[in-house]
Image (tube, helix red, strand yellow):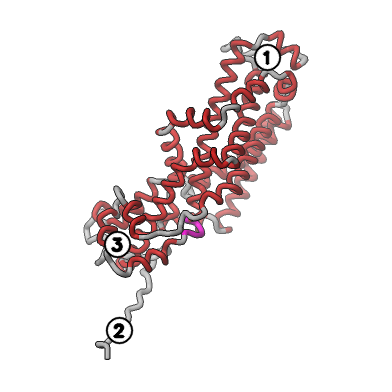
Amino acid sequence: MTHGAPAGGSKQNDPIASTETWFVRHGLPYFVPGERAAARDALTPRRLVPLGIAVALGAVAAAVVLAWAVGDLTLGAAGLTIVGVLAAAFYAVTALRGRPILVWAVNRTMSSLHLLLPMVTRALPLLLIFVTFLFINAEVWQVAANLDGGVLWLTVLMFAAMAGVFLFTRLPEELEGADSAVDADRLRRACRATPLADEVEQLIHDDRVDAEVQAHARVEGYERSNLLLVMVVVQAVQVLVLAVSVFLFFMVFGAVVMKDSVMESWIGEGTHHFSAVPNVSVELVQVSVFLAAFSALYFTVVVVTDETYRDQFFTQVKAELDRAVGVRAAYLVLRERSLPARPDDDGTPPTVVIEPPQGPAG
């Protein structure tokens, strides 16, 4: 049975090509050979070195101009760091094919936004009380409100980097066992409502399928990194939503209850207000940003380290990744059987070994 696209056909008529589109839509571009090859090429030194030099020179120039314009070296250092981070993020989203991962994570978070707040209140009931206590603490105002603008944003980036390192070091544990026990029943459940649904029903009745599936069950390299990136980005988007919510809460809360006399007694100097919003001071914004970043780091650590919270936050994502692993196994089996009609990752036709027919036994 050949699954290659017929001459003049389209992706809708080709389950293999349709499945590759399905992978991309579900944030798994590295499950597609062509996308994986493009990402691998984007990480070669011939691509990274010239780009890194250009970004470094541009970031240094922007930092020098910013520091000279405002007369603050800390803003120059913050600008240099932010330009580097934004350039790396843009390259990851474009050349490294990270856009589908980000789009899927954002869409999934937005579609389940009504579930996020109840989940947060169940997982971290003391978070809001804890950070509210910090908000009305004079020492926090003395620290956060007196930070220079550049130092404040460097502190936020430091919190974000710590959270990212924590996610990348702890979340691989969640992938253990994701690619084990891929059998016929799992294939059927995984491929339901996918482009491979009909193909799998035929496939599971083949006596050879168990051995072929087990040969392709293990997820390694770029594909395993894709699973990890999905979990990290999903968690990062949820943490970002939480941080923005905390920031907005403290902005409103502070504008209502924090009087200038109180803030001035805490920070030891006068406050600076925005002309467009008289009740909002620069110091209030700084404290709200600082506590929102701290809350995001605290939220990340607690969710990843506590077993109960991990189950609440990662059960659905892990179920979707388990399903993707099953779809991948069926996809690879069908793709291998249709290799004569398909090129390899580098665009060249694959080498197919044809064994001579064997004579009758005996």
The mark nearer the N terminus, 3 or 2, is: 3
Between disc 1 and disc 2, the foreground one is 2
Q: Which residue is mark 1?
A: 272
Label 1 and label 3: CA atoms lie apart by 70 Å
Q: Residues within 10 Å of mark 2 (few under 14, many from 20)?
A: few
Q: Which residue is mark 3?
A: 204
Tell me the element at label 2: loop
Q: Is residue 65 visible?
A: no
Q: Position of residue 266 (x, y in %)?
A: 74, 15
The mark nearer the N terminus, 1 or 2, is: 1
The mark nearer the N terminus, 1 or 3, is: 3
In the image, taking residue 245 as reference, residue 347 lies left or right, namely: left
Say what amino acid the circle numbered 3 marks.
Ile
**Do labels 1 and 3 touch, CB within 8 Å?**
no
Q: Start and end of the magenta stretch?
A: 219-223
Above or below — where is 254 with respect to 192? above
Q: Residues within 10 Å of mark 3 (few under 14, many from 20)?
A: some
Q: Position of residue 22 (x, y in %)?
A: 35, 49
Above or below — where is 284 with respect to 77? above
